[in-house]
Image (cartoon, rainbow, N blue to C red):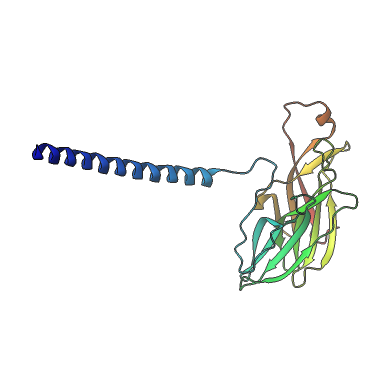
Amino acid sequence: MTAQINISSIRFVGLLLRSSIFFACLTVLVFLLTAESASCAGGAVGVPTLAQAPVADKLPANIDIYATADIGGGKQCLVGAKSDADGLNERPMVYLVGSGGKFAWHVQLPILKGSYQGRATHCVVSTDALYVLLQIDTYPQQNLNQGVLQVVALNKKTGAVIASKYIDVPNVSADYTSWVEQGGDNFKLERAKLVIKGLYELMSERDHPSEKPPIPFTVEISTNLR
């Protein structure tokens, strides 16, 4: 009788150990798969994805950073937007981070009068200035909204506005909405010119939905924004 009890106990302990090992392995596997999915997930097309801001100073809770750019000397340009308590009515924000990770300055940029909201999405640097791309929404309703692009030149030391220019899609006379996807190749400095690569669609297409994809365009402008 004692031998049978001992054998049964041994079998039970063995089964328990195998079950524990199985569930531990299963937990690790689920964790790894979840991490992999998170690292591969990307933002929706045409919707800015939030970027990490590796700085020592803490950003306010209502500030979203859309891109960071290394501007040399251990400094970074952070571009994004400030929103209200509901996450709406965005206003473009630019932060300059010094070599020690502290904010040297920050500035809220004005948007087109009468527009609904706007955000700063790209930043490049020249020897004379920082150049920031603003993307402005004229209306909160998607079917009425006409995306507007604006380039603003800022003083690197103070963040003061030096000049600005609205960007028109070339050779398009009809009403349209335009935007620029994330990525440094879509807003860059080449041979003393700013190169902007974006997409647009005609407003009339919204009244007659179709399978037509957005149309790409490229604009080159002088760094003096004239």
Question: Residue 178, image x and y in percent?
Answer: 79, 42
3 over 191 or under it: above or below: above
Q: Is residue 46 visible?
A: yes
Q: Is residue 117 left or right of residue 211?
A: right
Which residue is at a point 62% across and 72% down the rendered structure image? 99
Give the position of the N terminus as an image quadrant: top left
Q: Is residue 175 left or right of residue 101?
A: right
Q: Nearer the viewer, residue 15 or 148?
A: 15
Question: Residue 131, image x and y in percent?
Answer: 75, 60
Query: In the displayed image of the protein, which residue is found farthest to the right?
Result: 114
Q: Is residue 190 visible?
A: no
Question: Residue 212, image x and y in percent?
Answer: 73, 29
Q: Nearer the viewer, residue 149 or 51?
A: 51
> In the rendered picture of this protein, how many numbered marks are placed on residues?
0
Give the position of the C terminus as an image quadrant: bottom right
Which residue is at a point 85% across and 45% down the rendered structure image? 138
Query: In the displayed image of the protein, which residue is found farthest to the front?
Result: 1
